[in-house]
Structure formats: C-alpha cells, structure tokens
Amino acid sequence: MGVATCVNSTCHDVAPHAALPANESNIQQNEYRTWLLNDRHAKAYTTLLSVESQRIARKLGLKSAATASICLDCHADNVPTEQQGPEFFVSDGVGCEACHGGSERWLSRHTLTPYNAQRNLDDGMYPTSPVKERMALCLSCHLGNEKKMATHDIMGAGHPRLGFELDTFTIRQPEHYSTDADYVERKQRETPLSRLLLGTALQAQAVSKNLSGSLVDHPQGHPELVLYDCHSCHHPMDDLRWEQRPSTEGLKPGAIRLNDSSFILLTALLAPIDAVLQQKMSDGIKRLHGASTRSIKELQKEAQTLFVLSQQAQTVLSDVELDDETKKAMVDSIVFYGIKGEYRDYIAAEQAVMGIDVLAYSLPLDPTLHELVERAYRHTKSQDAYNSRGFVLDLKSYLQTKQKTER
C-alpha cells in the first residue's frame, strides 16, 4: 500500500517535532519523520543510485542496481508489480511495510479499539516485537538466506562485507517507539542484554541453516564462498600471519576457514551458565571445520548438529536470570576466548567487541571495562588494519588490571 498510506494528519506524522504525542495516543505519532530523516533504511534505495552501486551493477552485468531484483530484495520493499497499491513506490526504500508486512488487510483495522494484536497478525501484520521473528527479518538482509543473499559474486563486484549483532544495530537507528508501560503491556519487555543473548543464538541458527542447505551444495561444486571467513583469503600474500585457532585445530594453513564468529560468541556467552552445552558447541565447531575439508554431506550434517545446539542455547539463554557477577563472567569468557587465540581473524573479533560492549553497558559503571570497550572498538575500526596481537595484549591487560583491583 506504500509509505504514504501511513502518513497523514491522524496517524504517524501528527507531531513531527514534538517530544510527546499530539494526544493520548499510545504511539509517538512522529514515526514517519523519524524514519525519513534519521533512519538509514529510508536511504536504502537511494544507495542504489550512487556511482559505486552503478559500478557494482556493471561488473555483475546488470543494467542498473536500481532495477535489479538481487539489489532491490534488500535495498527496498521488492513487491511484485501486481501487488503494488496506487501509493506504493519502490523508491521509498525499506519502508514501513518492508518490516511490518503488506498492509492491504490490516491498514484500516489496526487502530480499532480495543487493541488486538492477534487480529493484526491474522490480517498480515508482521510480528516485529518478539526477538525471534524480528531477528529472522533482520537477518534476511543483514546475513542472507537461500532466497536472497549478498553472494561472493556481489562482494567481489564491490559490495561491502556484512556483519550484524541485534542490539548494536538496533541502537544505531533511532527508535520510533517508546518502551513504556503501555508498550510492555501490548508487546514484550526486552533489554539490550536479552537482544544480545537471544540474538546471538538465533544468528547462530541462521548461519547453521545456510551451512546445511542449498547454499553449500553450490552449482560450482563448492559452498557459496560468502559463507567463509573473508580474511582467510583477503590479505596481502606477504602477510604471513596464519596461526592455528583452538576452534580450527587440525586445519592445515591452506584451509579456508568458515565464518564461525556467531558460534564463537555464543559459546563464550554459554560458558558461565552451561559448561556442558558450551563444550558441546566447542566440539561441534571443530567438527564443522574438519568436515568442511572433506565433503559437502559431512559439512551439512555438522551444521545441522550446531543448529540443534544453538536451539538449546536459545532455550538456556531465554530462561536464565543474570546477576551482575554472571554478566562479568560472560565478559571474562569473551576476553579469555580472545587470549586463547579465537580472534585471530577480524570477523570473530568484531562480533566479540559488540558482545563485550552490550555486556559492559548492562553493568554498573566500570571504568576499566569501558576503557577496554573503547580500545576494542579502535582495534576493530578497520578490517584492513586489524592487528590481532595488539587486541590480545589489551585483553590481557584488562584481565590483569581487573585481578589487581579485586585483590
């Protein structure tokens, strides 16, 4: 139906400059302007008009990035022509209905009182409130799946590498809702920490699915290359930095490592609360890497095992009540994984830093920990300049300072 159908004087653009809604509505009533002016999703289509996007399109043999489905699938609400209402414009980018679902059936009914969430869902509104459903929606573009993905071909043509962590990416965009008592009553309460814990488990499941399905059984006879750790290959030939990682023990120097960053973070988060499941995950990651050097079938089998383990982790992390000591233990676990050598590659370090950041801000102010967060972000600011040894030194320094303080 289009973004324009959400924007009028009684709905989502009533109070564009007000801090409070224009009346006693349970919504902000400035959602459209927040999205339009400050949310990068609103600029997603415009990106396809850039010189760089057109250059990528030419390399891929496409007439235009702004008309190619493989680009529009994530940079817009790529709705078939026959399903577009009179006020729908693909140029609106990732608009309201790209996340909330096509509104033909629910547009006129979702404001009826009393509010009925199930009625809206039955009418086709997408459930963005539950973390599981929201994560699936986000990852469909920010990670990719069998239906749409920024493949290695697209990356090779110049598309930036993708990375994601639910809480970090959530707070990078402006909220167009207020998590007040009314919101919690109608939907669900969540915290940055719950987004990290559940999001990591769900992301690991999504990666497992990609590694156990048709993306692995690639027409070229090898798994889709974007499933691997980019920096296993992409570094100067005279940069002889290869070292064994605990999780890839047994792989030869020439073996290309899979992108296991979400598995590593999930395993580190599990360590303080379920050592048995953590060990199973660790063993599963090693088997996954080993299988990747032998056969597609073995790789798919081990990926399926990690999917089940990640589901178990989701259950554990959903039910756990974390006190500050457990949160600190999670930080220490992530740090220890780095000291052991799990963050030799940039992508794993990037995921770990986002995890430490979320945990740090869920704890009472700790200058030592926040200094670590600042230094960690500086280490991972550039994938090309990343120095794993420098990062490890800072991780060791943090633990040493922490231990001295606790004595």
Image: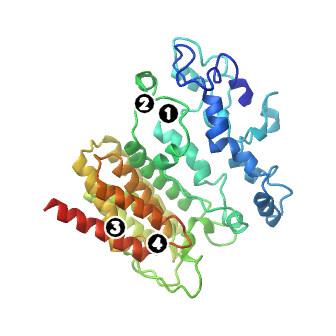
- The answer for how far apart the CA atoms under marks 2 and 3 are is 33 Å
Type of the residue with mark 4: His
- Foreground tag (1 vs 4): 1
Tell me which residue sits at (42%, 51%) in the image.
Answer: 201
Q: Please give the label number shown on residue 289.
A: 4
Q: Secondary structure at mark 3?
A: helix
Q: Nearer the viewer, residue 379 or 142?
A: 379
* Of callouts 4 and 2, the N-terminal one: 2
* Of callouts 1 and 2, the N-terminal one: 1
Question: Looking at the picture, does residue 9 appear above or below residue 136?
Answer: above
Q: Which residue is mark 1?
A: 129
Q: Which residue is mark 2?
A: 188
Tell me which residue sits at (72%, 24%) in the image.
Answer: 5
The crowd level at tag 2 (other Cα within 10 Å; few <14, some 14-19, many 20+) is: few
Tell me which residue sits at (66%, 37%) in the image.
Answer: 37
Type of the residue with mark 3: Tyr
Which percent across, then down, holds residue 250? 41, 81
| Contact between labelled residues 2 and 1, with CB atoms less than 8 Å apart | yes
- The answer for how far apart the CA atoms under marks 1 and 2 are is 7 Å
- The answer for how far apart the CA atoms under marks 3 and 4 are is 18 Å
Q: Is residue 142 left or right of residue 329?
A: right
